[in-house]
Image (cartoon, rainbow, N blue to C red):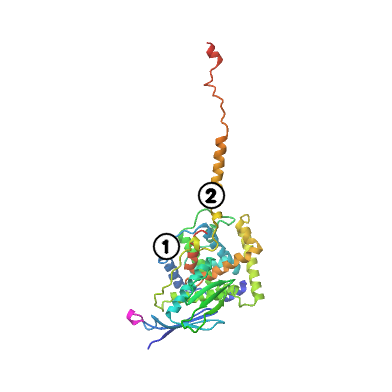
Amino acid sequence: MNEAASQSLRPLPEKPKLFKQLKRSNSTKTKKYILSRRALERLDLLMLAIESIDLNGGESMVWTSHQLGLETLFPNRVELWKRRCHNPLRKATRRGLLSSEDSEALLVLVSSMAERLYPFLHQLLSKKEPSSINHQRWELFNRRLRELISERLNQRRGAVINMLDPNMSNELYKPLVRTLALSSGSGGIDRLRASLLDQKP
Amino acid sequence: MIRNSIQFNETSVKLVVEGLPDFSRGHDERTIGIISNWKLDLIGSPVLEGQRVHLESLMTTVLKYGRYLISNSARPLGEIGNSVRIIPKGDQHELLLQSTRDSMKTLAIQIDDAELVDLVRCLESLRNDPRIQIDWNVPIYAPLNRRELANKSSFWELIAAPFVGILAVSVTVVIAAIMPISTTQSPLQEPSPHNTQN
């Protein structure tokens, strides 16, 4: 999947355009907000899903963050990892909540990565693809995501046990892919932000 | 007469919007300020056409549906009698389009997640395109409240934790209240037999 991913990844728009997008989304459309622990959990899972599709996802995220002008916030993988560790389900979890700036930067990053990987997300979600090929794609994605979850998340937590259950994985993983697909595109980041700020169910 | 046409393409959706600049609002020649016609081509479905009102109705319904779907709370949208309705159907979505002509039956189009996302992206591009200067009456995205979420916790799940907490405190208080207090007096208060004799 990774080789194919590198062949048909969508190139990111030119840097100035991305700067403008980021500025607009930071200044006019959003107020300061704090993501709940539940939202941070979801955001980190989306990033794990990105890494499952793009095997070199960790590096791609750092590279994309530099392209987006976020190098002051995420100069390297460690800084990015520190922000992601606010997910309460992580093995090495960090206390406290993310600042508004960090949260917005992570949202921009997820949305941009979703845009780059959109052809793959489309293939995964499409019913028009041959079913055997689609089944193989989902198998590969599920296996990779399960591996990443068991490697990085605390397996004593009930939510993580549920995620690793092969019978539950289809129910849990497909919405992740759909969320990523809906996060891409011009209004994707606003949709994703609004969904992460939903009230606690 | 200047007639502009702008096309939005996704893998399975093509949207073409035709219109004119509104010179009274200071638009340049390449801008569309008045929509005269639009065409939506969803692969495997008949080509849809209409006026601005229908496009706006389609945008409102589909973008709102996309907003609910990203929160895993898809629900039927668009009232009966509306030109556009969308209903979740298993792992697909049914788009119901009512023609303004009385003789035409309601058109039902089944779309999967990928096609729906393509349609959402197309309509979003249209909404955010600077070449189309139209004040769309489409709601902006806002967080959903508890009532709108599909996977909300039940009443019992919500009160379970506080109930157990209150019960635990009450039991502790009751046990503490019925526990007998020792009645032994302190040695200072007890009169010693030696002192009384003296």
The residue identified by callout 1 is A31
Give the spatial CA distance, label 1 vs label 2.
Answer: 33 Å
Nearer the observer, B25 or A28: B25
Q: Residues within 10 Å of mark 1 (few under 14, many from 20)?
A: few
For residue B162, the mark is: 2
Q: Is residue B29 left or right of residue A145?
A: left
Observer-side mark, 1 or 2, equals: 2
Instruction: Tell me which segment is drawn in magenta.
Output: B22-27
The kind of residue on which mark 1 rests is Lys
Q: Position of residue A32 (x, y in %)?
A: 43, 60
At 50% from the left and 78% from the top, the residue drawn is B97
At 52% from the left and 72% from the top, the residue drawn is A115
For residue B195, the mark is: none
Q: Position of residue B189 (x, y in %)?
A: 52, 21
| Mark 1 element type | loop
Q: Quadrant of residue A26?
A: bottom left
